[in-house]
Amino acid sequence: MQRLSMKQAAALCAAMVLMCPAFAFEVDTFKSGQSKEQVKEALKSYTFDKVQDFSAQTLIAYDQPEKGSNRQFVFDFCNDKLVGFQQEMAPSPRNLMIIINNYISKYGQPIKVNAGSNVTSIGDKNELALYWRKGLDVVGVRYSVTQPIEQLLLQYDVPNNCWQTPR
């Protein structure tokens, strides 16, 4: 049996990656790689109160706070392709524990954990964030408390050339 050179091995690995299905998140009707226009079209069925182009790279869909729905989606684009998605959930320690337990069961132990406190212009901010790898993708959960606001976010990111994952 012939041994492969480093160049041959690298070329073989690259070919295998190209032949395998791409690692990509798919959450509801949103898939990494979609254009901003495709995401906007898919958002129509969600009937958010507002869909806003926050910047060239970010699209936000949300309900007004007085509605109490806690519905907010944040979409991040790199070169007009969807590469990041955050979904706000109803913040509670119970929901956080259920999500973490489900992710540990599904993905194993987290690859990164950030826990910290700092002082911001509106007061103390406490945060716990955990990240897992799913293939090349990063899946995360982040719980932050800045009194009186609590926030629970689910995050999905694919590798891209605009920022490093996990963020």
Image (cartoon, rainbow, N blue to C red):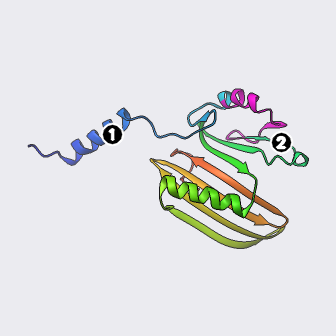
The residue lying at 63 percent from left, 36 percent from top is: 28
Label 1 is placed on what type of residue?
Ala
Separation of residues labelled 1 and 2 (CA atoms): 43 Å
Q: Position of residue 105 (x, y in %)?
A: 51, 56
Residue 97 located left or right of residue 124: left
Quadrant of the drawing holding the C terminus: bottom right
Instruction: Out of 78 and 20, give the one closest to the viewer.
Output: 20
Where is residue 39, by image quadrant? top right
Please name the residue that numbered disc 1 is placed on: 14
Q: Which residue lies under the disc numbered 2?
A: 63
Q: How many marks?
A: 2
Label 1's element? helix
Question: Which tag is nearer the camera, tag 1 or tag 2?
Answer: 2
Asked if residue 47 is among those painted magenta in the image, a careful observer would answer yes
Q: Position of residue 99 (x, y in %)?
A: 62, 56
The answer to whether residue 114 is visible is yes
Residue 156 vertical placement versus 16 (above, below): below
Q: Which mark is residue 131?
A: none
Q: Residue at x 65, y 27 (%)?
A: 38
Which three-letter amino acid code belongs to the residue tagged 2?
Asp
Residue placed at 63% from the left, 32% from the top?
29
Residue at the (58%, 61%) spot, across then down: 130
Measured as percent of width and height from the top left, residue 34 is found at 59, 31
Front-most of residues 45 and 167: 45
Farthest right residue? 66
Q: Which residues are magenta?
A: 39-59
The answer to whether 152 appears left or right of 161 in the picture is right
Is 21 colored magenta in this rendering? no
Image position of 11 with respect to 101: above or below:
above
Task: Label 2, secondary structure: give it.
Answer: loop
First in sequence: mark 1 vs mark 2: 1
Height in image: 125 above or below 5? below
